[in-house]
Amino acid sequence: MLDLLREILQTLRNNKLRTALTGFAVAWGIFMLIILLGMSRGVYNNFQSFASADRSNTMSVWGGWTMHAHKGYKEGRRIRLLDSDRTRIYKDDAEHISSVQGSIVLDSAKLSTSRDYITEAVYGRFPDEVKYAKLNMLKGRFLNQLDLDEKRKVVVISSQSARTLFGDENNAVGNYVKAMSLAWQVIGVYQHEWETGSYVPYTTAMMLNGNDGRVGELIVRIKNVNSVEDGEAVEQSVRNSLAATHEFDTSDRGAVHIWNRFVNYLTNLEANNILNMTIWIIGLLTMLSGIVGVSNIMFVSVRERTHEIGIRRAIGAKPRSILLQIVTESIAITTIFGYIGIVCGTFITAIIAKISEGTDFLKDPTVNLSVALEVTIVLIIAGALAGLFPAIKATKVRPVEALRDE
């Protein structure tokens, strides 16, 4: 093995310029592959952060305006969702719906203290919103069932709001803010990537709306669905339930608006997979030019070493050893310069990740260990293929003809 390595190094030293130029083509192809894979990963990570697993199994439903006449009603009728719709939707498809919750938005309310004030959206939600919205509680707690049962005037605010209203997150919990002509006790402070609104108990928000039963949005959480077809079937089930209650045509898409996050998630996931596959193809084609160059070098090397190969064959070297040497040289050239491309590409993606930090397009566009291993495997296979055909040619050289070759 040591002799083989020495021979490889000797070959590389004897052809420095040729090896360097061909190696540059390999390094450039790998470099571009790493950059493209990093950018693809950044887009995918950004998609995952906005379409997290906890949100991807939900549907949001809003009331709209009918587009068709139905059962004596004219088109253009306003459909307003009710709290009672939650029970009807769940009962009609309990096999695929795990829960239905209402959401009330109290528009942009003014929250104030003696220190300062802010104007932001106030949401009437249920206790499990902290899990589905992935709110990181910094201080205190989120809403609980007792808050809903007793219709408490409590509020959970963002860390940004806490700093504005109280100067620091530590001073917020237990104190009061004034909003909508009422005093609200702050029970928790949360942190989130983009959300800054405040949360109050759903029942309290309903009371402030006059207890008329109207809700701004229904949040349907689904289960036992695995495909786009399943997701669309549950969406139609929700539409059918609301059509029966509010008396509109089930085919009327304007009556209620449904954002099916599950179907969107699968569609976007498929698009990201296609993007990743396309990038691999482009990267491999870019790297192909370097691999062809390595193969050409090995053909030239075999030609130049015909006399040497003849001597080795004459003194008893087996074709397998000749084959191994040529293929190993090819793998060595490809791997050495390929790793240079990997290192440079990883360094550049780290710079891109730093520059794009906090943007809405890329999130952590770096290459992880699994991708590096995949590229390494590609390098080894490519190197072996680049040297295979020259090696086969070398094994076919007859010792007598090789010894006569000048």
Image: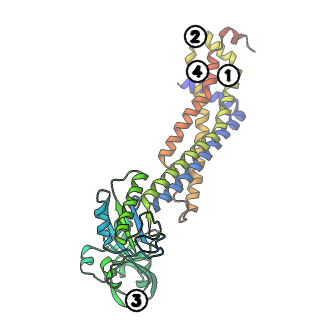
Q: Nearer the viewer, mark 2 or mark 4?
A: 4
Quadrant, the C terminus: top right
Relative vertical location of residue 24 with respect to residue 174 in this rendering, above or below: above
Question: Which quadrant of the view contains residue 299?
Answer: top right
Q: Is 316 or 29 nearer to us in this picture?
A: 29
- Quickly name the residue at label 1: 302
Residue type pointed to by label 3: Thr
Q: Is 94 or 361 nearer to us in this picture?
A: 94
How many angstroms separate mark 2 from mark 3 (CA)? 94 Å
If you read the primary sequence from the N terminus, does the residue marked by circle 1 or circle 2 appear first? 1
If you read the primary sequence from the N terminus, does the residue marked by circle 1 or circle 4 appear first? 1
If you read the primary sequence from the N terminus, does the residue marked by circle 2 or circle 4 appear first? 2
Residue type pointed to by label 2: Gly
Left or right of residue 309: residue 191: left
- Quickly name the residue at label 3: 113
Q: Nearer the viewer, mark 3 or mark 4?
A: 3
Q: Are marks 1 and 2 in contact (CB under 8 Å)?
A: no
- Quickly name the residue at label 4: 323
Q: Are marks 2 and 4 in contact (CB under 8 Å)?
A: no
Q: Nearer the viewer, mark 1 or mark 3?
A: 3
Identify the residue at image location x=54%, y=41%: 375
The local secondary structure at tag 3 comes to loop
